[in-house]
Amino acid sequence: MHAVAPAGLRVPRNRVHPRAIWVWTTRAASGWIAVLAVEVLILIVGEHHIAGWRYAVVAVTAALALAHVVIMPQWRYRVHRWELSDQAAYTQSGWFVQERRIAPVARIQTVDVHRGPFEQVFRLANVTITTASAAGPLKIHGLDTATADHIVEDLTARIRAGDGDAT
């Protein structure tokens, strides 16, 4: 008996949870705050007769940080999508470099859920779908925890019910 081949690459139907914007914003802001803190510390303790260019560096860093923190999360939210069909799991992710992936359900080996510190604060989770593909796992970031748990349960049940070896 032959399995039905999944449909080709297409835009998945489901968006990630809107709170993912806050996770991405918080993560980006925390990184930029660390960079700016180091720059300001260098500005404070450094030689003051050559501080002019250091003010410019801090100003440019602050402008880049603001642009990144404001634009990137919104952009990622518009791009990140996912979908599960009877035949396959579809993902789309990225912002500058965008990736669209598909994994036939019959090829899925493991399904994992991950909740980092930022995700826990915003009650979100990430799902990783591992296949035998050399391209690596499919990842769905920014799901509410109930949806992530449902995906894991659903795909785990399908893996158990399948008759293939997922290779």
Image (tube, grey):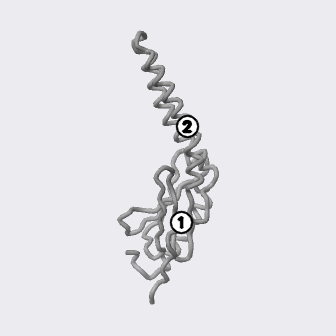
Q: Nearer the viewer, residue 21 or 108?
A: 21
| Residue 9 marker | none
Mark 2–mark 1 Cα distance, whole angstroms, equals 35 Å
Q: Nearer the viewer, residue 14 or 128?
A: 14
Residue at image position (59%, 50%) is: 20
Q: Which residue is mark 2?
A: 67
Q: Quadrant of residue 79?
A: bottom right
- The quarter of the picture where the N terminus appears is bottom left
Residue at far top of view = 49
Q: Which residue is mark 1?
A: 152
- The quarter of the picture where the C terminus appears is bottom left
Q: Nearer the viewer, residue 150 or 20?
A: 20
Against 151, residue 86 (above or below) is below
Label 1 sits on what residue type?
Val
Label 2 sits on what residue type?
Ala
Residue at far bottom of view = 1
